[in-house]
Image (cartoon, grey):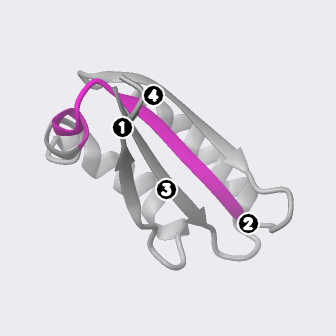
């Protein structure tokens, strides 16, 4: 299992619209091969800041299967205009295997 994480800094005043758009976008990601689960967490200390975590079976499921799919274009259209700056996406795996 691979954990994808991204800190999402949303443009000021756009959080409600982002949350509504993400409710639509999550249907896209959850339908992809290798997807396990996801969550979006809102920062308590900073308005307009979120943490996205997605569990994938493999990194290729995210990097190739999702990001190179036509559905990813819809994901981008729904979400990418909210970010400032664009998030750094990183992947993690357990060291306790």
Q: Which mark is residue 6?
A: 3
Mark 1 and mark 4 in contact? Answer it, CB < 8 Å: no
Query: Which segment is the magenta one?
Result: 49-62
Residue in the image at 34% along x and 24% along y: 35
Of the residues under marks 2 and 4, which one precedes in the sequence?
4
Labels 3, 2: front one = 3
Task: Give the crowd class for mark 1: few <14, some 14-19, many >=20 residues within 10 Å.
Answer: few
Task: Give the crowd class for mark 2: few <14, some 14-19, many >=20 residues within 10 Å.
Answer: many
> Camera-side residue: 3 or 78?
3
Mark 3 and mark 1 in contact? Answer it, CB < 8 Å: no
Q: CA distance from mark 1 to mark 4?
A: 24 Å
- Residue at disc 1, secondary structure: loop
Labels 3, 4: front one = 3
Of the residues under marks 3 and 2, which one precedes in the sequence?
3
Labels 1, 4: front one = 1
Q: Which mark is residue 27?
A: 4
Q: CA distance from mark 3 to mark 4?
A: 18 Å
Q: Quadrant of residue 31?
A: top left
Q: Picture coordinates of residue 43 (x, y %)?
A: 77, 56
């Amino acid at each position: 299992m691979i954990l994808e994480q991204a800190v999402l800094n949303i443009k000021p005043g756009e959080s409600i619209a982002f949350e509504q758009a993400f409710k639509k976008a999550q249907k896209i990601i959850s339908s992809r091969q290798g997807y396990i689960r996801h969550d979006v967490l809102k920062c308590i200390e900073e308005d307009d800041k979120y943490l996205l975590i997605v569990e994938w079976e493999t990194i290729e499921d995210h990097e190739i299967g999702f990001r190179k799919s036509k559905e990813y274009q819809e994901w981008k259209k729904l979400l990418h205009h909210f970010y400032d700056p664009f998030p750094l996406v990183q992947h993690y795996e357990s060291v306790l295997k």
